Amino acid sequence: MSDQEASFVITKVEGEAEPLTSTRKQMVDNLKGMTPGKPVLGVIGNKNLEPEPEPVGEQLTEKEKAHKRELIAFLLKYLDPPEMGTKFKPEQTRLILRKKVEKQTLGELRRFWSGKIPSSDDDIPDDKKEEMRRKWTDLSP
């Protein structure tokens, strides 16, 4: 989907005349149960034309799985947990960060660190660490 396309389309059948406010109310009511940020397929309302496709899981080889685990551990070491306010403990914010990082696919994780994972902290310049943190802040879900 390009940046110019809408995430949903409302279609009206010729001859059905109803006020704009009732159409908006119906749209809002139908969108309440949907996950925010997820594209909507089919028709909004009771007449769904096609079911939404099931999400396809990531198919990785053993080598890719091992690389993904290493990359997750590496990113968790340097990324800052999200600021959730005083209501959350630091352990809870670290857990939220861990879940977000583990949810990403290997391709998405490579956006934050595409090179070889260094063996020690001394091998990573501070500007690279800051760039990785900035990318995470900009691109993370």
Image: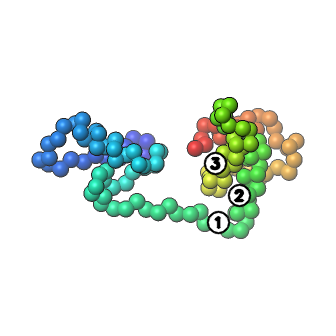
In the rendered image, residue 8, in percent from the top left (x then y), is placed at: 35, 46
Asked whether, in this view, residue 16 is left or right of residue 62, the answer is left
Residue 128 can be seen, yes or no: no
| Residue at the (64%, 66%) spot, across then down | 60
User: What amino acid type should be assigned to the residue bearing mark 1?
Assistant: Leu
| Residue at the (70%, 43%) spot, across then down | 92
In the rendered image, residue 34, in percent from the top left (x then y), is placed at: 42, 49
Q: Which residue is mark 2?
A: 68
Which of the image's four quarters has the C terminus? top right
| Residue at the (70%, 63%) spot, across then down | 65
Residue 135's place in the image compared with 44, above or below, is above
Asked whether, in this view, residue 70 is left or right of residue 2, the answer is right
Please rate how many residues cluster around mark 2, counting C-alpha atoms within 10 Å: few if below 14, some from 14 to 19, many from 20: many
Q: Secondary structure at mark 3?
A: helix
Q: Nearer the viewer, mark 2 or mark 3?
A: 3
In the rendered image, residue 91, in percent from the top left (x then y), is placed at: 74, 42
Q: Which mark is residue 60?
A: 1
User: What amino acid type should be assigned to the residue bearing mark 2?
Assistant: Lys
Answer whether labels 1 and 2 touch (C-beta < 8 Å): yes
| Residue that extends furthest to the left in the rendered view of this protein | 15
Viewer-proximal residue among 15 and 134: 15
Q: Which residue is mark 3?
A: 100
